[in-house]
């Protein structure tokens, strides 16, 4: 883990010196003035993160986000190069809409397969092209501004919240212990409203 953090730190400092030409928008939903703010640090190749998007997030959206009580922001915490590339795809439209992120999690088993990064990228590209997501895959993957934004998310998550695993939820600035226990999550949110 320390080796991985060191590699990402080196990458960050290499790209961090360049100023971003375009401000990258965070992927978020909900009322910006909501009393409860949730940050979700996640990696697109993480099976537990996909489970969160499939099982917990829909209930959270229905009960709290759609009614304006909670704002949720999805933060990138890529655990490998495949997750970094997929995060670039999720942010590529730069419209702040997390629909593509949700789509990548819903279809994770279709693209997170293969022995090499080239194989995984091929499956990811085929998924995006097959479903006409209107993206230029190569341009998205090679976008250094988006890459810098994603790596900044990861580094700030480590520094600010000591993120070590994904998914990790931060609710109003505090770590939430069990992101897969919706009953506990719901009670925690209800106490803050």
Image (cartoon, rainbow, N blue to C red):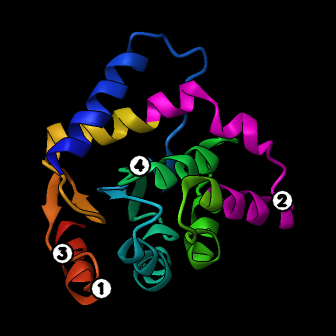
Residue annotated with mark 4: 76
Percent across and percent down for residue 51 are 42, 81
What residue is shown at x 40% (from left), y 82% (from top)?
A: 56
- Secondary element at tag 2: helix
What residue is shown at x 58% (from left), y 60% (from top)?
A: 101
Q: Tell which circle, 2 or 4, labels the residue nearer the N-terminal end.
A: 4
Visible in this render: residue 94?
no
Q: Tell which circle, 1 or 3, labels the residue nearer the N-terminal end.
A: 1
Q: Tell which circle, 1 or 4, labels the residue nearer the N-terminal end.
A: 4
Percent across and percent down for residue 35 are 30, 56
Please give left or right for residue 15 compared with residue 157 in the image. right
Percent across and percent down for residue 4 are 25, 45
Foreground of the two, 141 or 77: 141
Q: Is residue 170 above or below residue 51?
A: above
| Callout 2 touching callout 1 (CB < 8 Å) | no
Q: CA distance from mark 2 to mark 4?
A: 23 Å
Query: Which stretch did the figure color magenta?
Result: 121-149
Residue annotated with mark 2: 129
- Secondary element at tag 4: strand
| Callout 1 touching callout 4 (CB < 8 Å) | no
Q: Is residue 23 above or below residue 188?
A: above
Q: Residues within 10 Å of mark 1 (few under 14, many from 20)?
A: some
Q: CA distance from mark 2 to mark 1?
A: 34 Å
Return the residue found at the far front. Answer: 115
Q: What is the total number of numbered labels drawn onto the structure image?
A: 4
Q: CA distance from mark 3 to mark 2?
A: 40 Å
- Secondary element at tag 3: helix
- Secondary element at tag 1: helix
What residue is shown at x 40% (from left), y 68% (from top)?
A: 46
Percent across and percent down for residue 58 are 50, 80
Residue annotated with mark 1: 182
């Amino acid at each position: 883990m320390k080796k991985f953090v060191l590699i990402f730190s080196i990458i960050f400092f290499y790209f961090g010196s360049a100023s971003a030409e375009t401000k990258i928008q965070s992927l978020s939903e909900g009322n910006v003035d909501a009393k409860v703010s949730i940050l979700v640090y996640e990696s697109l190749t993480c099976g537990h993160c996909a489970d969160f998007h499939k099982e917990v997030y829909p209930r959270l959206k229905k009960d709290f986000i759609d009614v304006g009580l909670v704002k949720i922001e999805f933060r990138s915490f890529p655990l490998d190069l495949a997750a970094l590339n997929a995060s670039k795809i999720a942010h590529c439209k730069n419209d702040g809409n997390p629909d593509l992120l949700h789509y990548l999690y819903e279809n994770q088993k279709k693209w997170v397969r293969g022995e090499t990064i080239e194989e995984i990228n091929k499956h990811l590209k085929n998924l995006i092209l097959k479903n006409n997501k209107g993206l230029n895959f190569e341009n998205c993957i090679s976008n250094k501004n988006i890459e810098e934004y994603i790596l900044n998310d990861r580094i700030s998550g480590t520094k600010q919240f000591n993120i070590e695993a994904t998914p990790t939820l931060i609710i109003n600035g505090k770590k939430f212990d069990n992101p897969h226990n919706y009953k506990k999550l719901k009670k925690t949110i209800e106490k803050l409203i």
